[in-house]
Image (cartoon, rainbow, N blue to C red):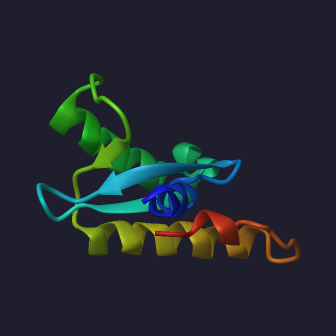
Amino acid sequence: MGQNNQENKIERQVPKGCLAIKVGNGNEQKRFVIPVFYLRHPLFLQLLKGAEEEYGFDQKGMITIPCHVDEFLFVQDMILKERRHLHNHHRHNLVGCFRI
């Protein structure tokens, strides 16, 4: 039993420069680990505005984005495409942030 708890703890760790969020409504929620630079992106800020309207500023624990997972994945794809376009000549070590 101790090993299971340790494995679960390792799985839930969030890399430096990232944060864990929940996306979805009700029982249809999924956990994502995203880079913190998302918090400054206008598309992600719109999702946060939806969270504010749904839950207010009093959310406890992990940020929950109340949209469909597919919508979040679309926004994530747009953010990453834009970032690749703007920083095409730089390599970013963000792969560790995109664990589910």
Q: Nearer the viewer, residue 21 or 90?
A: 21
Whether residue 57 is situated above or below residue 97 in the rendered picture:
above
Left or right position of 22 against 89? left
Whether residue 71 is situated above or below residue 45 in the rendered picture:
below
Residue at 22 percent of width and 59 percent of height: 24
- In the current view of this chain or complex, which residue is farthest to the right? 89
Q: Residue 60: x and y, percent?
A: 30, 29
Q: Nearer the viewer, residue 11 or 72?
A: 11
Number of marks: 0
Q: Residue 25: x and y, percent?
A: 15, 56
Residue at 70 percent of width and 75 percent of height: 85
- In the current view of this chain or complex, which residue is farthest to the left? 26
Q: Nearer the viewer, residue 13 or 32?
A: 13
Residue at 58 percent of width and 53 percent of height: 13
Whether residue 17 is situated above or below residue 10 in the rendered picture:
above
Left or right position of 2 against 16? left
Q: Residue 97: x and y, percent?
A: 62, 63
Q: Residue 22: x and y, percent?
A: 34, 53
